[in-house]
Image (tube, rainbow, N blue to C red):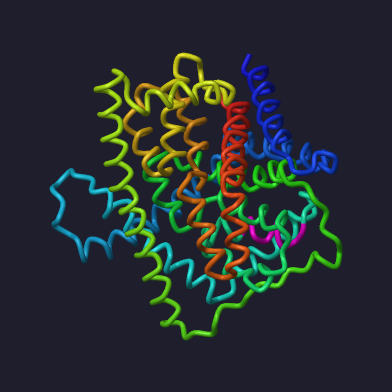
Amino acid sequence: MKYIIALIGLLVVFGLAFIASSDRKNIKYRPVVIMVVIQIVLAFLLLNTNVGLFLIKGISNGFGKLLEYAAEGVNFVFGGLANDGAFPFFTNVLLPIVFISALIGILQFTKVLPFIIKYIGLILSKINGMGKLESYNAVASAILGQSEVFISVKKQLGHLPKNRLYTLCASAMSTVSMSIVGAYMTMIEPKYVVTAIVLNLFGGFIISSIINPYTVTAEEDILEVQEEEKQTFFEMLGEYILDGFKVAIIVAAMLIGFVAIIGAVNNIFDMIFGISFQGILGYVFAPFAFIMGVPFKEAVSAGSIMATKLVSNEFVAMMDLGKQAKEFSPRTLGIVSVFLVSFANFSSIGIIAGAVKGLHEKQGNVVARFGLKLLFGATLVSVLTAIIVGIVLN
C-alpha cells in the first residue's frame, strides 16, 4: 500500500511542478528519472544498510564532538545561568553555531571546502543535465548558507538570465547551511538530517528541471568563483566567529517573534472558532502529509507541523515536532523530520532576495518577483524528499 501512496505522491508533486512549468515542451525527462532513482538508492543506503548507518553514526558523532567543544566556550561565558537539568535553547542549540561557523572559516581559508565544493559540483553537473554553475551553487549552498553562497558567484550574477537565476535561488532555499546542521541534530534524529541534506541536493535539480527547464550552452557553462578578499588567518577567524554569532542572534530573534505570534494567533482562533490556527492549517496540509506516507490518523497533526515550518521557520516546527513526538509513529517522525530540513519558508524569500539585491540590485528585484514560485518549488522539493524517505522506511 505504501508504494501505491508513494506513486500517487510522486505523480502529484511532478504534476504540480508541470503545471507551474515555464517551458513544458523542453523538460528533460531522462535526468529527472535518473535523479529520482539516485534519491531512492541513496535513501535506502543511508537508512536501511549497515554502511549507511555507520556513515551517519560517524557524522553524528563528529557533530556531537563539535558541539562538546562549542559547549566549552559557551559554558565559559554563560555557565551558571541555567538551573541544573534545564535546557536553555539559546545556549545549548544556537550558540554552538558560532564555533561551527569558525570551523567552516578555517576550512575555507585552507582551501579545503572550495576544493570539495567545486569537484562535487562538477560531478553533479554530469548527472543533472544543468550547468557547472548551478551544480557548484547547490553544493556550496549546503555548506555556506542560502545568503552567503551568492557572494562566491557574484561575478556572474549580473549576466545570468532569469531561468538560471531561479535555479540558483531554488537550490539555496532547498538546502540548509552546514553551520546550523549541529543545531538540527539536537532537535531531530541525525540520520534524518543527513538524509534530507543529500536528497534535497538532487530534489532541487529535479523540481527546477520541471518548473524551469533550459539548456546551458558550452559558451555559457563557465564557472567563475569569486575568491574571498585576502585576509590574515585571524582576520578571517574573527569575521566567521562574528558571522556565526549574528546567525545565532537572528535565529533567536525570529524564534521569539514567530513563537509569540503563533501563540497569539492560535489563542485568538481558539476563542473564536474553537480550533487553533495551526489546527486549521493541519487540515489544509493533511493531504500532502498523507501522500508523503504519513498514516491517515496522524496526517492532520503532521500537516500542522509542516504548515508551521512554511509560515514561520524550521526551528519552530522542529520544536513542535519534539513536543508531539510521543504521539507519532517512528515512520511519521522520519517522514516529517526530513520535510523540515530545508529553508523553504516565507521569510527565506526576503533573505535570498535581499542577499542577491545587495550584490546586484536589478537581479535582486527579479528574485523578489518570482519569490512565491521559488517557495512553491522549494516546498515541492521537501515533499519529494519526504515521499522518497517514506518509500524506504518500514
Q: Which one is in front, 83 or 207?
A: 207
User: Residue 322's quadrant in the figure?
Assistant: top left
Q: Give residue 13's position: percent from left, percent from top.
A: 66, 31
Residue 149 lies in the magenta-colored region: no
Q: Residue at x 22, y 61 (%)?
A: 75
Residue 134 lies in the magenta-colored region: yes
Q: Is residue 334 above or below residue 378?
A: above
Left/right of residue 170 with respect to residue 298 in the rendered view = right
What's the magenta bit mostly, secondary-structure-wise?
helix
Q: Which one is in front, 378 or 22?
A: 22
Question: Magenta stretch?
Answer: 131-139
Left/right of residue 167 with respect to residue 248 in the rendered view = right
Left/right of residue 116 with respect to residue 124 in the rendered view = left
Q: Give residue 153's position: percent from left, percent from top.
A: 64, 69
Q: Which one is in front, 35 or 85?
A: 35
Q: Is residue 47 above or below residue 150?
A: above
Tell how many labels. 0
